[in-house]
C-alpha cells in the first residue's frame, strides 16, 4: 500500500489539489485498494500536546491515523508546499509524533517520493531537500527524481483543478516512476 500525503493543515490549500491528482494517477495505475490519501488538513488537531513525546502519551486519534495510513504502508508520496523556504512545520510535527510509537516500523526500509509545490519559481526544492534529510534519518529511501512544481496558482482553473497539460503529464510520469521504484507496478 502507498499513502499519498498532502503535507499542510491549511484549509483549502492548493497543495491538496496536486496531492489528490497524484493520488488519482497512482490509483489508476495500481488500483484504488493499493493507494490511500491523507490530507493533514483533515486530521483532528487533538493529538497536538507535549504528551505525544512520552511513551504511552500518543493520543488515540493519532494512533488510529498511524495504524491506518503509516504503519501498513510500503511507500509514501509527500506533496509538500513551500513554507518559509522549507516544508510545513505540521508535516514535521506529524512525522515526529508518529515516530514515538513503533519507531522502526513507521518509515524504516520504506520508499518515498517527494513532490514540492510553490507559488514561486523553485517548486520547493529546498523543502524537498530538508524533507529527504528527515526521511533518510528515519531509514526511508527516497526516489532520486524529486518533482518540483512551480507557479502553482497559474496551473489551476477557477474550480481549483489542474488545467496545465504539461504538468499533468509530468505528474503522471512521476507516478509511474515511483510505482516502479516501490516495485508495485
Image: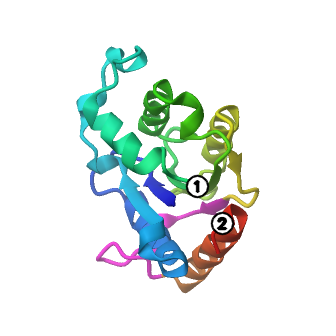
Q: Disc 2 and disc 1: Cα gap in Å?
A: 9 Å
User: Mark 1 or mark 2, which is nearer the start of the sequence?
Assistant: 1
**Chain part drawn in magenta:** 147-163
Residue 45: horizontal and vertical position, in percent? 26, 35
Q: Quadrant of residue 166?
A: bottom right
Between 112 and 55, the one lying in front of the other is 55
Position above or below: 17 against 113: below
Q: Is residue 20 left or right of residue 26?
A: left
* Colour scheme of the picture: rainbow
The residue identified by callout 2 is: 178
Callout 1: SS: strand
Closer to viewer: mark 2 or mark 1: 1
Callout 2: SS: helix
Position above or below: 40 against 35: above
Q: Quadrant of residue 13?
A: bottom left
The residue identified by callout 1 is: 75
Amino acid at each position: 500500500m502507498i499513502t499519498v500525503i498532502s503535507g499542510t493543515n491549511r484549509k483549502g490549500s492548493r497543495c491538496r489539489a496536486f496531492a489528490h491528482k497524484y493520488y488519482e494517477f497512482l490509483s489508476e495505475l495500481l488500483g484504488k485498494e493499493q493507494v490511500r490519501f491523507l490530507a493533514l488538513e483533515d486530521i483532528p488537531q487533538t493529538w497536538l500536546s507535549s504528551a505525544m513525546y512520552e511513551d504511552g502519551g500518543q493520543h488515540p486519534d493519532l494512533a488510529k491515523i498511524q495504524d491506518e495510513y503509516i504503519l501498513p504502508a510500503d511507500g509514501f508520496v509527500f506533496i509538500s508546499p513551500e513554507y518559509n523556504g522549507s516544508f510545513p512545520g505540521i508535516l514535521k510535527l506529524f512525522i515526529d509524533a508518529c515516530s514515538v510509537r513503533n519507531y522502526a516500523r513507521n518509515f524504516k526500509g520504506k520508499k518515498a517520493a517527494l513532490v514540492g509545490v510553490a507559488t514561486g519559481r523553485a517548486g520547493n526544492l529546498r523543502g524537498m531537500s530538508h524533507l529527504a534529510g528527515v526521511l533518510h534519518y528515519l531509514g526511508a529511501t527516497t526516489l532520486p527524481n524529486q518533482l518540483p512544481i512551480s507557479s502553482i496558482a497559474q496551473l489551476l482553473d477557477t474550480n481549483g483543478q489542474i488545467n496545465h497539460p504539461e504538468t499533468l503529464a509530468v505528474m503522471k510520469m512521476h507516478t509511474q516512476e515511483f510505482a516502479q521504484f516501490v516495485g508495485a507496478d
